[in-house]
């Protein structure tokens, strides 16, 4: 799901004006990719402690992405339908991350 969200973020941000290529579009893309990448990197670690730490970093990147989405919406770069879809996906991923962190640290 995290990779699907990153792909969707790329699709939405592709429609931003050229002036945002190195601004909000880049920030959104980097934080979305970071969520998926940190989950994968943590999974590849040898210990639950490391995995948990990377999952927490992924949570932070997800919150960063949610903020970027809301800003994009407020400045009329992201339409309401896309905003709702992206935020719903982020919410689902956040719930899964929280559950996985609890299981790994138990």
Image: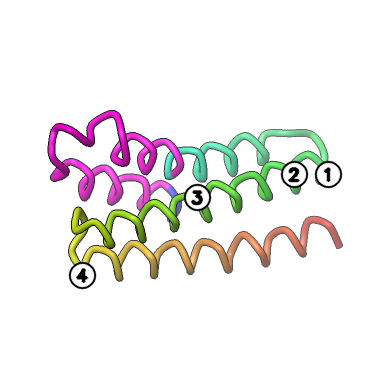
Q: Which residue is mark 4?
A: 81
Disc 3, disc 1: CB below 8 Å?
no
- The residue depicted at 51 percent of the width and 62 percent of the height is 93
Q: Which residue is mark 2?
A: 53
Which comes sooner in the sequence, label 3 or label 1? 1
Q: Find residue 79 and report its image quarter.
A: bottom left
Q: Find residue 94 and report its image quarter.
A: bottom right
Disc 2, disc 1: CB below 8 Å?
yes
What span is in magenta? 3-31
Left or right relative to 62: residue 60: right
Q: Which residue is mark 3?
A: 64
> Residue 6 location in percent, x, y?
36, 46
The circle on residue 40 is none
**Distance (Cα) linking label 3 and label 2:** 17 Å
Pointer 4: residues within 10 angstroms few (<14), some, or many (20+)?
few
Is 94 located above or below residue 28 in the figure? below
Q: Which residue is mark 1?
A: 49
Number of the front mark, 3 or 4: 3
Foreground residue among 43 and 97: 97
Foreground residue among 84 and 100: 84
Query: Quarter holding the C terminus?
Result: bottom right
Number of the front mark, 3 or 1: 3
């Amino acid at each position: 799901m995290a990779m699907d969200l990153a792909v969707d973020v790329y699709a939405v941000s592709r429609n931003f004006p050229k002036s945002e290529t190195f601004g909000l579009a880049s920030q959104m893309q980097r934080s979305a990719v970071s969520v998926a990448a940190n989950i994968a990197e943590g999974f590849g670690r040898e210990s639950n402690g490391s995995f948990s730490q990377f999952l927490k970093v992924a949570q932070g990147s997800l919150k960063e992405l949610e903020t970027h989405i809301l800003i994009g919406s407020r400045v009329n770069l992201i339409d309401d339908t896309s905003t709702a879809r992206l935020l719903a996906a982020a919410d689902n991923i956040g719930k899964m991350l929280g559950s996985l962190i609890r299981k790994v640290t138990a």
